[in-house]
Image (cartoon, helix red, strand yellow):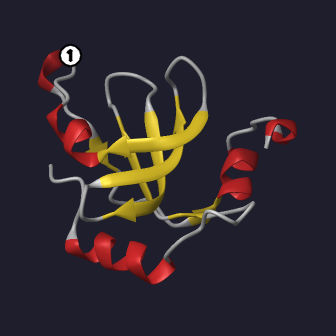
Amino acid sequence: MKLMTKELEKRFAEVGDQSQSSNPLIIAKFFAPSHSATWYATELDVENSICFGYVTGLAFDEWGTFSITELESLQLPFGLHVERDRFFKEIRFKELIKEQDIDLEHY
């Protein structure tokens, strides 16, 4: 599955820089179906295929950058690959962590 579409690229461009927002809009969700790793993208550098966003399910949850190219190349168990949640609806970060019952004191 191609993780980034032209429609998503256009949406990221419409939203633009969210680096000063304390409650950014999460535009896309990518996940590893064989474990709990999930990448929530708030910004995209189209030229370098690098997203900024919130990553959960690895050693610890954190904000940072991740490469779409690297996510697409990951080989997961059972022949699986990282996927884009095609049914994901944009959501503000604080709404997402409330839904997931994450402690807001860290943000």
| Residue that protrudes farthest toward the bottom in the picture | 14
In this rendering, the answer to whether 35 lies above or below 15 is above
Point 32% across, 70% down: residue = 8
| Image-based side of 29 in relation to 103, left or right | left
**Residue 26, position in %: x, y?**
54, 61
SS state under label 1: helix
Up-down relation of residue 14 to residue 45 (above or below): below
Q: In the rendered picture of this protein, how many numbered marks are placed on residues?
A: 1
The residue at the far right in this view is 105
The answer to whether 77 is drawn above or below residue 11 in the figure is above
Q: Residue at x 32, y 59 (%)?
A: 86
* 1 left or right of 30 in image: left
- Residue at label 1? 77
What residue is shown at x 72% (from left), y 62% (from top)?
23
Q: State left or right for residue 60 relative to residue 58.
A: right
Q: Residues within 10 Å of mark 1 (few under 14, many from 20)?
A: few
